[in-house]
Amino acid sequence: MIPLPALEEIVDRSGIAPRIELLLPIGVRARQLLVRTLLLGMLLVLADHRPAHLTRVHRALTRLPGDDQRRLGVVADWKHGPHLLTYRQTERTFGLVADALAKDAPDGLPSILLQRICGDLLEASIPDEFKNASSALAVDWTDVETFSRPPSRGTRDCADPEAAWGHRAGGGPGQDSELFFGYYASAATMMPDEHGRPVPELARRMTACSCHADPARALVPVLTGMPAAGIPLGDILADSGYAHRDAEAWAIPLRAAGAQLVQDLHPADRGPRGTHQGAIIANGNLYCPATPRPLLELAPLARDATPDQAAAHDLQTAETARYKLGKITANDEDGYHRAGCPAAMGKIRCPLRPPSMRLDRNRPEILTPPEHPQACCCQQTITVPPDVAAKTRQKHDYPSAAHRKSYARRTGAERTFATAKDPASNNIAHGWCRLMGLAPLMLWLACLLTVRNQRILTTWTARQQDNARRAAAGLPPKTRRRRRKTLATLTAAAPP
């Protein structure tokens, strides 16, 4: 259970309570339940692993110690004596908050104000010592069902008109996906920088949208708005669901905001995809036109690959990198840069570049150069506009060993929603939140991730203290047990 003072510190540090209060209408009689107290009640409910029900918020507030009830306004002095907060007052204040943060014409996307409120609340849950500890973020989205029954076939009449039909991973054997009615929730989780010190996996930003909207496009303005808040963007770790979007919808705006993409490519985007001035466009890079086709069509390493298979795969990707055109200049203001022939840069031997033939023979050699060389073979460098490989270009060559190690950090995003969907915890399944509309649901989700951050910090602190004790005793740090079992490990463990 997270103590009340810790939750009060988060709410006060975020500064969202007074900002919301200014948006609420002023009635004839002052409201007994303030926004600050309402937010504390919501956090208390979620910290106790309870569903997002307003009845539980009222119960949590009325069960506080007497001094806290007086201080928070749960018990107020009225004309005829002390008055205890009622459920209808709780429902009324929450309804006013939800209406103030929602759009005048709901369209399935959060308002700018609601997005800022949720972002400030999450940012306040991150201690100052970790705010600048890492700039890498792992992103993912998940399904959140609405409590409303879906509309009848051919109509849109239901209790939650902002919700829509969406797809999620199937729950049955051999079932790739299934339909659900509700919203997509997205989160950006802090991950350690490459070669940086470990950091707790804290959710730093979140958003939600109706299933008729694209969750990747809904997350882009949230991420690109972070530099304006003083939070620079570093590595953005994303799966192929994000990478497969149009470049204008995902890759280009993130690069413009200073981010570096580390993502898995969709099978439809892998391998050779056209040419530019004779150079082959493949996996986000430009390659020599004489590059062996099997090197350009290398697939990512299988998850159950043996060490020998991984070593062989790494040799092939290293060989592919020799054929890659090298970047000579940094991007200018318009995103253009210059790239040079790999033979001119001394990475391969090519008859079209006589000086390269004097290189030692441990480098690849082009035995059959193009009969009609194009610009990439005739010029020392070529100009590469920003629209070349704009969708697939990323920080590391795909699917090299450096990319594989860097991309492995993305699993932190999956763990974020795994804890939120844990049946032993809050479990954001159907019925978790019975309120309709995007604004109430998103506010509850922001509170849930705020509470989750506090649990992660508690576990992180305990683990660091345990490692310090083990180091003082001359013992190595405690490692996590590998739970995944592959067919290879089961076969090796089977008796003869």
Image (cartoon, helix red, strand yellow):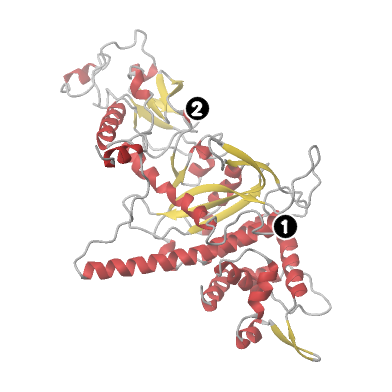
Q: Is residue 35 visible?
A: no
Expressed as whole percent of the image width and height from the top left, the position of residue 270 reads 44, 28
As drawn, which residue projects farthest toward the top?
A: 371
The residue that appears at 74% across and 46% down in the rendered structure is: 150
Q: Is residue 8 above or below residue 217?
A: below
The residue that appears at 21% across and 24% down in the rendered structure is: 363
Residue assigned mark 2: 268
Badge 2 amino acid: Ala
As drawn, which residue projects farthest toward the front?
A: 496
Mark 1 residue element: loop
Task: Write down the quadrant of residue 64 in the picture.
Answer: bottom right
Expressed as whole percent of the image width and height from the top left, the position of residue 450 reads 54, 64
Q: Is residue 105 visible?
A: yes
Residue assigned mark 1: 102
- Quarter of the image with the C terminus in it: top left
Q: Please state which of residues 109 and 341 is positioned toward the viewer in this rendering.
A: 109
Badge 1 amino acid: Ala
Foreground: disc 2 or disc 1: 2
Left/right placement of residue 385 relative to residue 215 reads: left
Task: Write down the quadrant of residue 177 in the picture.
Answer: top right
